[in-house]
Amino acid sequence: MKIPFTKVSKDAKYPLEFKNGNDQILSNFKFKPKTGGNLVHCELKFKGQLDTHCSICGKNIISNIDEKIELLINNGIFNGFDEEFDIYEMLNGNIDLDEILISEIELIKSDYYKCNDCNNLTDHNNENDENNYKN
C-alpha cells in the first residue's frame, strides 16, 4: 500500500496484513506529520508469528511477535541525523507501507534466536562452567 505524502493527515491510521508461508503479521501504521512538510513520525505496531531459525542448530522456530516501533519517514533524502528514531527515505513522494513493514520484519528475523533444545543445552553448559570456576 502506497500513500502520497500530501495525503497523510494527523493521527491517520492504516492497518496492513502480511502473510508469507508461516509468517502472519497484522500491523497498524499511525502517522503524525512533522512541521516542514517533508518529515512524518510513524508509530508501527505489529503482532503475529514469524518463521525464524535457531542460531545454534538451524532448526525452524515459530516466534510470536508483538512489537511497537517508532520511526521517521522523509519525503526525499534526509540531510541530518536523528539519535532517537530510524529514518526511512522515500524518494518518489509516496510512503510505501509494504516496504517499511517487510524491512522491519526482516530486521527482526535476523535477530539471534535459540530453540528450546539449544536453550536448555546452553543453560546446562553455563552451570558446568560456573562449577568449574568455583573449584
Image (spheres, grey):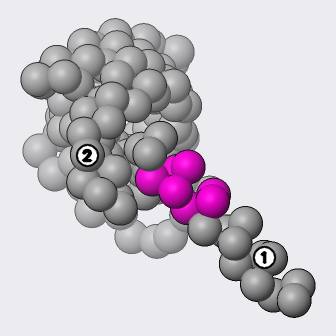
- Label 2 vs label 1: CA separation? 28 Å
Say which label, 2 or 1, has the lower sequence index: 2
Residue 107 place in picture, x, y as percent: 33, 51
For disc 1, the marked residue is 130
Residue 9: x and y, percent? 42, 17
User: In which quadrant will I find the C terminus?
Assistant: bottom right
Extreme residue in the front direction: 135
Q: Residue at x 16, y 51 (%)?
A: 91
Name the chief secondary structure element in magenta: helix
Q: Residue 133, position in %: x, y?
A: 81, 87
Q: Is residue 49 visible?
A: yes
Residue 87 shown left or right of residue 32 in the figure: left
Q: Is residue 86 above or below residue 5?
A: below
Q: Which residue is outermost to the right?
A: 134
Instruction: Say what secondary structure mark 2 lies in.
Output: loop
Q: Amino acid at mark 1?
A: Glu
* Residue sitting nearer the eye, 25 or 103: 25
Foreground of the two, 4 or 48? 48
Look at discs 2 and 1 and give the one toward the viewer: 1
- State yes or no: discs 2 and 1 in contact (Cβ < 8 Å): no
Numbered label attached to residue 59: 2
Determine crowd level at label 1: few under 14, some 14-19, many 20+ residues with C-alpha closer than 10 A. few
Quadrant for the N terminus in the image? top left
**Residue at (11%, 23%) from the top-left corner?**
21
Q: Tell me the amino acid under the disc marked 2.
A: Lys
The kind of secondary structure element at disc 1 is: helix
Residue at image position (69%, 72%) is: 128
Q: Which residues are magenta?
A: 118-124
| Vertical arrangement, residue 73 with respect to residue 94, above or below | below
